[in-house]
Amino acid sequence: MTVDVGTGWRLTFDLSPEWLFCRLSRNGAEASPEPSLAQSVWSIAEEHQLRRLVFELDEEVRLTSYLVGQFVLLHKRAELARGTFRLCGITAFSFETIHLMGLASRFPNYRNREDAVMGRLP
């Protein structure tokens, strides 16, 4: 399933019985600086009654403080619902933004989806 979340942004979702996998990518248009990410992801999670989320970024997506803030919102929503929010496959360049914001311990960068689901830290 694919959803456009603001000008220039696309979220692709894959579902398993217990997990929602989300991938943010650009769709070729001039990208708006603040896509409605957290609300869009959480709406899909609620629709499918899933509280375990794994989030990925396409390589061309540059991680901004706004996007990290959206991760924080999703993490809080998942925790309040007794779920999980994990990141995987984030490039070292993008992950540096999370590290500089002091959030690397909250958001470890799992190598791939399988490691994120199993909780195998990098």
Image (cartoon, rainbow, N blue to C red):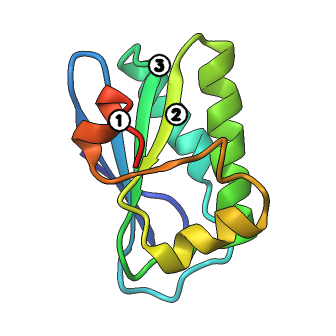
Residue 2 left/right relative to 9:
left
Calculate the distance from the C-alpha at mark 3 to the C-alpha at mark 1.
19 Å
Mark 3 burial class by Cα count in 10 Å: few <14, some 14-19, many 20+: many
User: Can you identify the residue that label 2 sits on?
Assistant: 85
Q: Earlier in the sequence, mark 3 or mark 2?
A: 3
User: Can you identify the residue that label 1 sits on?
Assistant: 120
Instruction: Give the residue type at disc 2.
Output: Phe
Q: Where does the N terminus fall, quadrant-wise?
A: top left
Mark 1 burial class by Cα count in 10 Å: few <14, some 14-19, many 20+: few
Q: Which-is-in-front pick, marks 3 and 1?
A: 1
Q: Earlier in the sequence, mark 3 or mark 1?
A: 3
- What residue sits 42% from the left and 41% below the top? 121
Residue 65: quarter of image: bottom right
Query: Helix or strand or loop: what does disc 3 sit on?
Result: loop
User: Can you identify the residue that label 3 sits on?
Assistant: 51
Q: In the rendered image of this protein, does residue 88 appear above or below residue 79?
A: below
Judge by depth and name the residue closer to the eye, 30 or 122.
122
- Residue 87 image offset from top left, x and y in percent: 46, 48
- Residue 29 image offset from top left, x and y in percent: 43, 86
Residue 16 left/right relative to 74:
left
- What residue sits 69% from the left and 15% below the top? 80
Q: In the rendered image of this protein, does residue 40 appear above or below residue 80?
A: below
Q: Which mark is residue 79?
A: none
Mark 2 burial class by Cα count in 10 Å: few <14, some 14-19, many 20+: many
